[in-house]
Each structure stands twice: as structure tokens, then as C-alpha cells.
Amino acid sequence: MTKINNLIIIVSFFCLWIDSFFSEKIQILVGFSLIFSLGILHGSNDLLLIQRLNKQKNNLSYYRILSYYILVVCAGILCFYTIPFTSLLLFILFSAYHFGEQQWKKIENQVPKSLEVALQFTYGICLLLLLFIFHTAEVQNIIQEISSLLIPPFYFTLSLEIFGILLFCLFVYIYVQFVELRNQLLIELFYLIVFAIIFFSSSLIWGFSIYFVLWHSIPSIINQIEFLHSEFSFATFKSYIKSGFVFWMASIIGIVVLYSLFKDEKIFNALFFSFLASITFPHVLVIINMFKKKR
């Protein structure tokens, strides 16, 4: 395990310890604050990443890239209003692959691409299903508010069993066929157990914010900075914040406006998740291309 991951484990369990001193409302407030800060920040430089990725292909202007990006975001919002359940399902699937890709980036070029994608997606969906299983009632309410559909708990359990078996088979196959990856497999299995403990021991928002900020956003920010500046340092981190500040603030202001307008209405959850999903869809595609370019 790397030093940064060892530190993240310590901070994660510290967060579990301090949550016993917070009411659920305080946990939600702090959790959303973390998501809106570092969580949103990790996607704030998508336009700069797109420019860097397209530099050798074609010289697209910043405003043309911005126009395409806004178009994709608006298309996501429109889909959430017209086909909410399908859009929510796609959001979960995209997020699952995105989380798994971040966790398993170290195996790139060490296994066939199809096996790599299968492992990343299966690991990510198992991670999310663990969160759903430990907070089924809350997840059911959110899905119902967005899509008007009530998903029976049985489907969450069945999905975790199916993908859990698939993940186990992938682990066994890779363990047998790729000796050099055995240590990495054991480490990631240990992390999955850590995630299960975090989700089980905390509220929905608090547990998700611990994972999303500490385990996903911070490592992703480091990867993006290394891609953009070839190194990670305090100076390059400041540059990263500066270049993404406008998009970061625009996202936060948009969420704050939604909350101020709809905080007492059930529609806020639908609006909030449609907003996050609309940002997530293009961000996932950008990060996929970033890792592809690094390879």
C-alpha cells in the first residue's frame, strides 16, 4: 500500500470515530460540504483536460469545447426529466465504472483490456451496492422521489450477490493467471472490506462522502495534476485550483440556488442528482480518455 493510501485509511477511521459526536443533520451538512469542496473540485478541470487531450489531434478553441461540454450537461439534465429511471440507472453504471477505474488504474496494460474493464466495472458496482445494502430505505426513498418507482430490497441483495460472485470469479482468474498482480488483488480486497465497514458504520451521506472525497476525489486530483503538469506539488496544486475555480464556483452556486428554491420540496433530490449526474457523464468520459492517453 502507498503512503497516501495508508494515510487515507487512518483519516477514514478517524472520520468514523468523530461521527459519533455529530447528529445526523451535522453529518449531512459536513458530508455535503466535503462533496461540494474537494468532490466537485476533482471535476472542475475537465475543460483543461479536454484541451490537453485534443492538443495533438485538433486545435479546438476553449469556447467551442465549453459549448460541447455545456451541451452534454444540458442533454443529461433533459434525460433526467424525460426518462428519470433510465438516466438514474445510467448514472449509477457510469459512476460504478468511474470508481472502479480509479481503484484499479495500476493494472493498466498488465491484463487484456476486456478483463481490465470487466474488473473495474464489477468492483465499482459492488462498492456502490454495498452502500445501497446498508442504507436501503434511504436509497429507496431517493430513487422513488426521482423516478416514482419503489425498488424492493430484494433487488439490491440479488444484484450484490450476482456481481459479488462475478467479482470473486474475476479475482480467482487473475490470481491464477497473473502472478504479479496477486498482491494488488489482496490489497484491493482489503480496501473493499474497509469500504464495507465505513458504509455499515455511518449514515448514507457521511459514508459516501468519506469514500467519494478521500478515496476517489483526492487520488483523482493527484492523477489529473500529474497529467497536466507532469508532477504533483504545492505549486501545481495551486495552479489546478486556479484553473478550475470558475467552473468549481459555478457548480456550487448552481447547487445552492437549487437548494434555496426547492429545499422544502421533494423535487430537490431529483434536481440535485440530475445536476450531479449531468456533470458526471462528461467527466467520466474525460477521465477515461486521460488514462488512455497516459497509457
Image (cartoon, grey):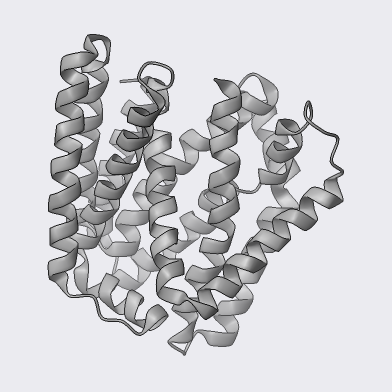
Q: What residue is drawn where x is 84% and y is 46%? A: 62
Report the side of 42 relative to 100 (left or right): right
130 vs 117, nearest the viewer: 117
Report the side of 2 relative to 126 (left or right): right
Q: What residue is drawn where x is 66% and y is 54%? A: 248
**Residue 138 at least partly seen:** yes
Where residue 5 appears, as percent x and y from the top left, is: 35, 28
1 vs 284, nearest the viewer: 284
Quarter holding the C terminus is top right
Where residue 226 appears, as percent x and y from the top left, is: 61, 24
Q: What residue is drawn where x is 15% and y is 50%? A: 162
Above/below status of 135 relative to 15: below
**Residue 31 at least partly seen:** no
Q: What residue is drawn where x is 24% and y is 35%? A: 191
135 vs 294, nearest the viewer: 294
Above/below status of 249 relative to 45: below
Where residue 168 appears, as percent x and y from the top left, is: 14, 35
Kindly give the residue lying farthest to the bottom in the view shown.
265
Kindly give the residue lying farthest to the top in the view shown.
180
Where residue 1 appears, as percent x and y from the top left, is: 30, 20
